Image (cartoon, grey):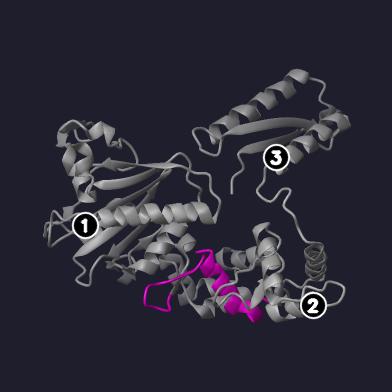
Amino acid sequence: MFPKSTVYIAAFNVHVNASQIVGSKSSERDQRKQQFIDNLGQVLYNQEKRTSEKIYFISNTEDDDGVFEEIREEISRQAMTMRDWGQDCPLKWLLFQQVLLKLKESNVSISSIQRLLKIAKHEDISIIKDDDVKQCLQYCHDIGTVVYFNEEKLADYVILDPKWLIDAFRCLVSDKIENDIKVSDDWQTLKDTGQISESLISLLFSKEPELKFEDNKEHLIEVMKRFDIIVNLKDSTALYMPCMIKSCSFFEVQRQFSDGNQPTHKTSWLCLEFKFLPPAFFNHIIAWYIKQYHVSVILDKQIRRKRKALYRQIGVFDLDSSGCEQLVVCEGPNTIALQVWDSSKPNKTYGKLGSDLFRFVDTLRKRYSLHIQYSFTFTCKDGDFTFNRKTIEDLVPQEYRCFEHNTNHISDDLVKPWDYSKTLW
């Protein structure tokens, strides 16, 4: 998803006034260049994707073709490092891709697989075997020209214009909607809890009738599920949009589960600490947990009814049917953290929860070709997992000083709940 090298192009002095465009004061332009470099450095500071950058400053009045040739050459060099560069492609595939492009340019944003199989068999293309056509479509999907999954519930249609899918998603998340929708119960439920009804989806899709989203609603929903934009609750048909769930502080979520009258045992925090965590990555994580476990239920006093304990950057899940044992999944700056709350049986261990998450993160890295790295660390049970995390090496001594609480903690108390005690011996 993120290239190992990045080309940044900054254009300056693009004003209407000709004298301003030329910019006689070179020092002013130098200052603006330096300001851009400084701002870029702050944005990319300490991020994994920051590996190699080239910056080009261009003018629309003074630069000759030389600088643009340099940019073209650099883009070519970067393109040659891409996975599909130089890959052999059958001539028939190229002909078929041209047909797909023509369909897209004719405003055919989605097509049935049966129609495309028939087109591919035309004598001008002559891809006879269905499997060969599907292999070509998979190649087109991999390079980003179509959206196609040869999977159950998805294989019957091919999205020929990926932007069409993006526009459909925008229909669901945009605040630019009619007032009658804004005051509807379904819209309020979406904004409060992230749950979206199919009737609301139809209503939102109807904002763009010329794009025919409603006609293809079933397939669009399935594709959005595939990308974890929409997710089904476990053992339920209810649909949720993780990106639309409202925010809530961890303190408030914790208060909803315990008023202090009954003791609750909390494990330490197990943290996955990333050098860089893509913004949408946690949506995949929370969607995965939604499919694996039943979401815990709380009484939300703000809306005066029961709701699922799902919030932006926080999810709480029942580990058993009693409701006495919850898994808490949180996101922080470049961090994903787990904690378990148990009001019935303290001192249990949860090593499998950690190893399952590690495996799923690795699956996501491979699925989306993400060049990201992480390490696992720990924070004390009442600590703030967003800082002052401890590595295994930090916890080799029997005790360590917790600067957040100004006291000593036993090192094994941090690692034992996650089955890492043996690593300290």
Earlier-in-chain disc, 3 versus 2: 3
Pointer 1: residues within 10 angstroms few (<14), some, or many (20+)? many
Q: Residue at x 52, y 64 (%)?
A: 229
Pointer 3: residues within 10 angstroms few (<14), some, or many (20+)? some
Q: Amino acid at mark 3?
A: Gln
Q: Is residue 266 above or below residue 234?
A: above
Mark 1 highlights which residue?
Answer: 341
Q: Is residue 258 above or below residue 49?
A: below
- State yes or no: discs 1 and 3 in contact (Cβ < 8 Å): no
Q: Provide the residue span drawn in magenta.
A: 212-238
Earlier-in-chain disc, 1 versus 3: 3
- The residues tagged by marks 1 and 3 sit, at their Cα atoms, a distance apart of 48 Å
Q: Residue at x 46, y 59 (%)?
A: 284
Residue 232 lies, in percent from the top left, at 44, 72
Residue 285 lies, in percent from the top left, at 42, 57
Earlier-in-chain disc, 1 versus 2: 2
Q: Which corner quadrant holds the C terminus? A: top left
Q: Residue at x 44, y 52 (%)?
A: 362
Mark 2 highlights which residue?
Answer: 121
Q: Nearer the viewer, mark 1 or mark 3?
A: 3
Q: Amino acid at mark 1?
A: Trp
Dot 3 lies on which element? helix
Verify whether residue 241 appears in magenta.
no
Mark 3 highlights which residue?
Answer: 78
Pointer 2: residues within 10 angstroms few (<14), some, or many (20+)? some
Taking the image as shown, residue 373 lies to the left or right of residue 207, namely left
Q: Amino acid at mark 2?
A: Lys
Residue 95 numbered tag: none
- The residues tagged by marks 3 and 2 sit, at their Cα atoms, a distance apart of 36 Å
Dot 2 lies on which element? loop
Q: Nearer the viewer, mark 3 or mark 2?
A: 2
Residue 370 lies, in percent from the top left, at 53, 48
